[in-house]
Amino acid sequence: MFGEGDPHSDLMFVGEAPGYHEDQQGRPFVGQAGKLLEQLLGTIGLTREQVYIANVLKSRPPDNRDPRPDEIEACRPYLLRQVELIAPRVVCTLGNFATKLLSGAQTGITRVHGSPQRTSIGTRELYLYPIFHPAAALYTPAMLDTLKQDFLRLPEVLGLPLGADPVAVDDVAPAARPVMPQPPFGGPAEQLGLF
């Protein structure tokens, strides 16, 4: 299962690995976590068809266990190539595995969620925006509010300039923050008729 969605989207989500329902249907994020992801997308005026959704692992680990380092390494080139081809402005990593892989750091999601990081993946400059995995919010309801708040900041992150210096959303003057981002080449906001 390689991914699904708009191949020209400015926003790409990367989760951990397919689960039971994803494995059965051959599509990413179609179980309960996927339903929550769709609801969260709706809060910012988007649908799953307007973003690109992928996972670190391209197949389900046995017994739904955590991905092993050798499995992550085997799938890494495919994910990096997906990012190159989709060329999003923002990659929203869902949980620890995607965040650690794409940031190159071992800092856990609890410490970095909601903080955009300007980075390069291959030849692409983009923002990495780590948030909790929707499945974590299903198991820990107190985490749901944090996930919602981080999600509501996505339009601001999409609107950040890809300048020479890293910048956090809080460092951008409110007047300089667009309500919805201006996509460079026909991204989700344009498809919604906002521009």
Image (tube, grey):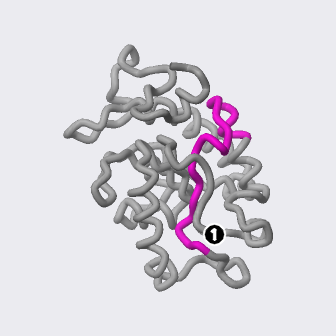
The magenta region covers 39-58
Q: Is residue 52 left or right of residue 127?
A: right
Q: Height in image: 186 above or below 11?
A: above
Q: Height in image: 63 above or below 103?
A: below
Residue sitting at x 41%, y 21%: 177
Q: Report how many numbered discs are placed on residues in the image.
A: 1
| Residue type at tag 1 | Met
Q: Residue furthest top?
A: 175
Quarter location, residue 163:
top left
Residue 192 location (% of width, % of height): 61, 26
Quarter location, residue 102:
bottom left
Residue sitting at x 44%, y 73%: 76
Quarter location, residue 115:
top left
Residue sitting at x 32%, y 29%: 171
Residue 99 location (% of width, % of height): 46, 60
Task: Name the residue that disc number 1 marks.
Answer: 1
Residue sitting at x 57%, y 64%: 55
Q: Height in image: 141 above or below 182?
A: below
